Image (cartoon, rainbow, N blue to C red):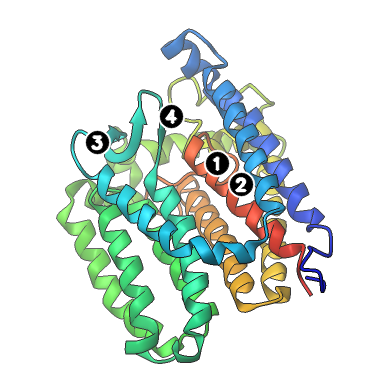
Amino acid sequence: MNVNGKIKSYPDTLIILSTLLLLGIGVVIVYSASAVLSAQKFDDQFFYAKRQLMWAVLGIISMFVMMNYDYHKLRRVAKPLLLICFLFLIAVAIPGIGSVRGGSRAWLGIGSFGIQPSEFAKLGIIIFFAYMLERTQDRISQFKRGLLPPLSIVVSAVGLIMLEPDLGQSVVLMGTAIIIIFAAGARVGHLLGLASLAIPAFVGLVVVAPYRLKRIFAFMDPWAYELDAGYHIIQSLYALGPGGLMGLGLGRSRQKFLYLPEPQTDFVFSILAEELGFIGGATVLLLFLLLVWRGLRTAITAPDTFGSLLAVGITGMIAVQVVINIGVVTGSMPVTGITLPLISYGGSSLTLMLTGIGILLNISRQTR
């Protein structure tokens, strides 16, 4: 910032370009992937596409608002924002308040319009962690006084999300939190020790839920569960395979004809690769790589620790979600419900992601 406290430079144009390109691709592919399902369920082939476009417009507005909102002011709302996130997570777990979709009580709202508190929690915890760890960075190398407080917060949030239950969002939140804590200067030995405790806990969460255990078995041999837990993986691979180098052509997917369930959400990349081929899929991944690279560059050149940790958290959240989603649709990871940022259909996830990118852009305007 200059001596008058005004933002001194333009935002990172490559972040804006990659974001808008991914968003545009997302709106087009959501329409293509959902047209058949929309026509069958709502007698309107544009049902999902219109809503995706609406959320995209709202998200872009939020992105540009946050791009011009000095991120330093987020320090003032970090604590109340964290409290609101926890209140939402508690409320959604209460029967009669939270609504069930896809087997999880993860939504607050009426009918088809609602918010997903776990999406708000990811951004809220990123902001709070940046605020908290900036103030306690001198003792982050200490386990009890430095590492344990932020870890307790994220574990509490993950515990509430697991009550929904939503293992995918829990993994993203935990992964993002660990990235911020590591960037703040936590000792690798402490993190490895926690990982040794987290792995048995993760295995326990899988074992106590038969459907999760079945997904692990289906990941290892999907054709042994082709009409059950392995169905999504198999249908996704049937989409990826025929895509080849150039794809079948936009709008010509076969798997969207009610073979691949809900193709506009978690498995939208499968339809994209089927229609646009390896070139289309690789282009999307390169755009994400560009976005992550510029995000990390913003973190490195941020004018203060708060901005640096904010940028690391937002960029890390995007990267973790992309890795998990692509891993799932390619059969490289067990199936879990994680959307592809900026591409998949979804109001809460899209709007909050664009809001986070807006904060990242504001930081980029004040870089050294």
Label 3 with label 2: CB-CB less than 8 Å: no
| Residue under numbered circle 4 | 262
Q: Is residue 76 visible?
A: yes
Q: Amino acid at mark 3?
A: Ile
Does dot 4 land on a helix, a strand or a loop? loop
**For marks 3 and 1 on the same chain, the one whose residue lies earlier in the sequence:** 3
* Image point (50%, 48%), residue name: 330
Does dot 1 land on a helix, a strand or a loop? helix
Residue 227 or 107: which is nearer the viewer? 107
User: Alpha-carbon distance for marks 3 and 1?
Assistant: 23 Å
| Residue under numbered circle 2 | 354
- Which label was assigned to residue 226? none
Closer to viewer: mark 3 or mark 1: 3
- The quadrant holding residue 155 is bottom left
**Residue farthest front in this picture:** 4
**Location of residue 169 in the rendering, given as x and y in whole percent from the top left corner:** 39, 52
Label 1 with label 2: CB-CB less than 8 Å: yes
* Image point (52%, 57%), residue name: 323
